[in-house]
Amino acid sequence: MSERIDFYTSSPAGMKALAGVHDYVSRCNLDPSLVELVYLRVSQINGCAYCIDMHTKALHKGGMPWDKIVLTQVWAEAGNWFSTAERAALAWAESLTLIAQTNAPDVIFTQMQAEFSNKAITDLTVAIGLMNAYNRLAISHRKLPDSAPRD
């Protein structure tokens, strides 16, 4: 598989706009490891190899144990590896990524309200939307993980 289009060079203004949202998320007082964990889960659901590779490495570099990173895909069955806040955020990420099927149910929103402020919920929702956008760019343009062998 080869890359179809380099989206950074084909639409620098569009990518700059997304980078602005990314910069906001990185400064909005959400725990960076929580954001990376959500980014990883969204990327797993969407099947984005480029993003899974990037966020897995970022989590490990940030000190998250490999066991927890590996169990992210099955967080709901992973025992005590994930905190209540992480569980709520991961459920929210899954629900919003699969919104056509889930319609963002009240039960998950209620879990979010128990763990996060309204601002944090909104900021996390922005982060989830951003990662879904990046996943769609990377998948549709066939962006390879940086570590992937090249032809």
Image (cartoon, rainbow, N blue to C red):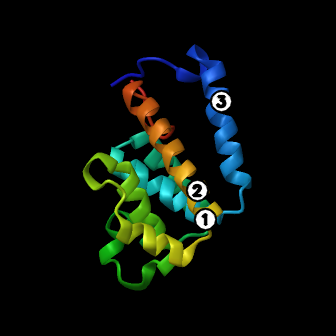
In the rendered image, the quadrant that contains the C terminus is top left
Image marks 2 and 1: residues in contact by CB distance under 8 Å? yes
Residue at the extreme left: 101
- Would residue 44 appear left or right of 82 to someone viewing this image? left
* Residue at x-position 45% and y-position 42%: 132
Give SS at disc 1.
helix
Q: Is residue 12 visible?
A: yes
Numbered label attached to residue 89:
none
Please determine whether, in this image, residue 73 is positioned above or below residue 114. above
* Residue at x-position 51% and y-position 61%: 37
Marks 3, 1: nearer the viewer: 1
Please determine whether, in this image, residue 32 is positioned above or below residue 130. below
- Would residue 17 appear left or right of 55 to someone viewing this image? right
Disc 3: which residue = 17
Give SS at disc 2.
helix
Q: Decide which of tag 2 and tag 3 comes sooner along the chain.
A: 3
The three-letter code of the residue at mark 3 reads: Ala
User: How far is the residue under mark 2 from the one under mark 1?
Assistant: 6 Å
Image marks 3 and 1: residues in contact by CB distance under 8 Å? no
* Of residues 105 and 64, the one drawn nearer to the viewer in this rendering: 105
Disc 2: which residue = 122
User: How far is the residue under mark 3 from the one under mark 1?
Assistant: 24 Å
* Of residues 147 and 109, the one drawn nearer to the viewer in this rendering: 109
User: How far is the residue under mark 2 from the one under mark 3?
Assistant: 19 Å
Disc 1: which residue = 118
The three-letter code of the residue at mark 2 reads: Thr
The three-letter code of the residue at mark 1 reads: Asn
* Residue at x-position 44% and y-position 73%: 110
Quarter-wise, where is residue 76 in the image? Answer: bottom left
Where residue 80 sits in the image (x, y, percent)? 42, 85
Please determine whether, in this image, residue 63 is positioned above or below residue 95. below
